[in-house]
Amino acid sequence: MKRSYVFPSVYEETTVDFAKVAANFIEGMKIVNFNQRDYLIGNMALTEGIALHKFLNSSAQDLDYQLLALTALIIASQGNDNKLVITTGFPFITHTIFKKGARDFYLGKHQVCFDTKTFGGSDVENVSLNVVAFDVMTEIDGCIKAIRRGQMAEKQNFFIGSLGFGTFELALSTPSGIIQRTAHSEKGINYAVNILENEIEKQYCLNLLTSQQIERAFQRGFFIINRRKVDVIEMRKRALTSYYNEVISPAMRKRFTDEDFSRTTKLYLVGGGAMYAELENLFKEEFQDILEVIVYPEPYLCASEGYCLNSVALTPSTNSLELKENITYVGIDLGNSNTVVTIYNESE
């Protein structure tokens, strides 16, 4: 059985004790005694925090990456002692330089403490996590694996555009692999968020808002400023249009030749940015005569689902039910906006 869990990629240090402020661990994540400090993670940081943190395109040496990764491992363990097989990924631009650090961080045993009182428990729980196998991919390869080996079961060539908050990734995929010449990373959705932020600051003061709060307002289409609702849907549309015209379209023109367009009739959009209808429509307008634009179902899950499929492939097949029951296959997409954890256990 495959399941996915999503939480915001934010954290904040805290000295406050909370009692039953959330319904479950996903809503009330609090890591304690990590380097002698306590941290609110994800939704808990959004609701109880004041000055949230998350850097763009972090490495495994960064505090935010480590906190989010360990939280993802707790979610993956599901309260049991299973061995974890993990796959995660990075954008093209950071994959080569970050992959060794990620391997060194993940592999082996981890001891993590979290506070159960936030969601109705009685104490701090210390969990032991054992990562027995690990792999790291590019984000685009993870998404391609989900498209080819998952529910879409795509057999033909296709273009792919991964619209993340930190990066926009693109490539031409064939059944034999991607054509390396076409693989490229560009600025992500944060480019459009910055445009909107600069525009709205001409009318309102946003000094007290963190970058994460501005990003969330961009996603939902309105700000609350001085107890008034400020609609930014049209402003967001203009920002996304500028982003498409200034970043996305030129990158595709540069990387994809006319010959490439003769090899496929499909363009898959994945990543959280694919959920903006404004962007989807811009792709359709530009390529309406030559490509079918396909948005992956729940596109923000695509990379983690591909990583999870890769984790399954890492472990040799066996007929031993006991062995299968003791392994949990995991894909962790530690994104700049949200972290997605997809798990699969053959015994379920």
Image (cartoon, grey):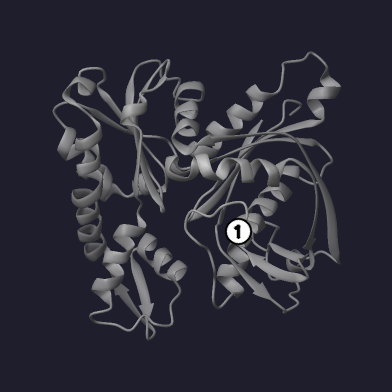
Outermost residue to the top: 319
In front of the other: 40 or 118: 40
- Relative placement, left or right, of 3 versus 222 is right
Residue nearer the viewer, 22 or 135: 135
Q: Which residue lies furthest to the left in this view?
A: 289
Image x and y of residue 94, in percent: 48, 45
Image quadrant where residue 288 sits: top left
Give the residue pinned by disc 1. Answer: 62
In percent of the image, x 57 and y 71: which residue is there?
A: 47
Q: Is residue 13 above or below residue 176?
A: below
Query: In this view, which residue lies farthest toward the front?
Result: 97
Q: In which quarter of the image is residue 194?
A: bottom left
Quadrant of the rendering where the N terminus is positioned: top right
On the rendered structure, is 261 left or right of 63?
left
Question: In the rendered structure, which amino acid carries the disc numbered 1?
Answer: Asp
The residue under the point 68% across, 76% down is 14
